[in-house]
Image (tube, grey):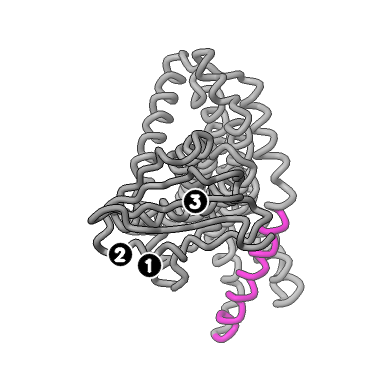
Amino acid sequence: MDKAAWQLDARPSGADELTIALGGRWCMAAALPSPDSVAPQLAAGVRRVRFDTTGLSDWDTGLLSFLDSLLKTCTARGIAADTTGLPPGAQRLLTMALTVPEQTVPGRNNGPTGICAQVGTAMIEFVRGMPAMLAFLGEIAQSLGRLMTGRARFRVRDLWLEIEEVGPRALPIVSVISFLVGLILAYLGADQLKLVGAQIFIADLVAIGMVREVGALMTGIIIAGRTGAAFAAQLGTMQVNEEIDAFRTLGIAPVDFLVLPRILALMLMVPLLTLYAGFIGMLAGLVVSVTIFDIGVFEYYTETLRALELKHFLVGLAKGSVYGAMIAFAGCLRGMQCGRSAESVGHAATSAVVTAILLITIAASVMTIVFYQLGI
């Protein structure tokens, strides 16, 4: 199709007005002109643009694409556009296109690429998300209050199912990771302690480290990646399917029915998994000490009992409970904030893991400093 299939004429029709005449066939099959061809006529003195389509014989999406770009250029330059001269169908379609904001897909925007810009953007988004996080925390507090007074509406069967998913089914991965971490601690400690001939204190290092700090931290990170992401994906999928909206329509608080069982399950099971991780880590230290450094089983057992105190177990349990609550909070928060698309579910799961690990790291630092200052 040659150029004669369409006509385009931009001519002044007043002191500050430009008339754009469109004629012929404006269809995708034709080699339509670029909107930039009209840009030079949109000089500084132009304050208004009107359209004349009396000579237009046929049009399709090609015309709409041309007009959409041209109208956006006019808006950017502060030029008023009179679209009454366009075909009625084109007016309606342009109104719809310009009224609905452009959809932004998470992870696909052309944002800042520098490391400093990315860190700054992440901090700004975190600060902007604080009101929503505090509001969700308030809803959880109200739900716990209803639980204490017996007014929370959720199924106990759901709680037991979450406990089974969080606890027993997480034992294999917790066992493997804890055993390997225990091996690492034992080897690192032995490498330094052998310099002074004090390999027996490997038992102290592994026992206190696993029970008090490392066991809870590794368990929290494992559960954040395993369960926190699952919570976000489950609630996000329910958000996509409008099931959460259905709960609200039925007068059932989604926080009571969906979030509360998950929080209780993690707060109950993560401390127990922390103790289990500590035991597995000490077992790994025993294996290394006996097989590599010729320390007797009885000597290692005795030194472990001497090193461990009740406060170490209490600190580990306290950290496990806090980490569990934070993982459930992050997973449920991102799930409830999920959009209405499949990609939003994946983004919610990823964001839940990142948020949970960030909260765990902050809590671990604060609690370690507090316990040190208290002499615990």
Residue that numbered label 1 is attached to: 40
Looking at the image, tell me whether mark 3 or mark 2 is earlier in sequence order: 3
Q: Which mark is residue 22?
A: 3
Q: Position of residue 44 (x, y in %)?
A: 26, 64
Looking at the image, tell me whether mark 1 or mark 3 is earlier in sequence order: 3
Specify start and end residues of the magenta stretch as a single range. Answer: 175-195
- Examine the structure image and report whether residue 184 is included in the region drawn in magenta: yes
- Name the residue rendered at 42%, 40% in the picture: 85
User: For this view, does 57 lie left or right of residue 361?
Assistant: right
Query: Judging from the image, what secondary structure is the residue with disc 1 in?
Result: helix
Magenta stretch prevailing secondary structure: helix
Q: Position of residue 11 (x, y in %)?
A: 37, 58
Q: Check the picture and name the quadrant holding the N terminus.
A: bottom right
Numbered disc in front, either 3 or 2:
3
User: For this view, does 47 lie left or right of residue 262?
Assistant: left
Q: Position of residue 234 (x, y in %)?
A: 63, 36
In this rendered view, identify the residue nearer to me: 243 or 180: 243
Q: Residues within 10 Å of mark 1 (few under 14, many from 20)?
A: few
User: For this view, does 262 lie left or right of residue 226?
Assistant: left
Residue 288 falls in image quadrant: bottom right
- Name the residue rendered at 44%, 55% in the picture: 70
Kind of residue sitting beneath label 1: Pro
In this rendered view, identify the residue nearer to me: 132 or 181: 132
Kind of residue sitting beneath label 3: Leu
Residue 340 falls in image quadrant: top right
How far apart, in angstroms, are the residues tagged by discs 3 and 2? Answer: 20 Å
| Above or below, comparing residue 202 to residue 363 in the picture | below
Residue that numbered label 2 is attached to: 43
How far apart, in angstroms, are the residues tagged by discs 1 and 3? Answer: 17 Å
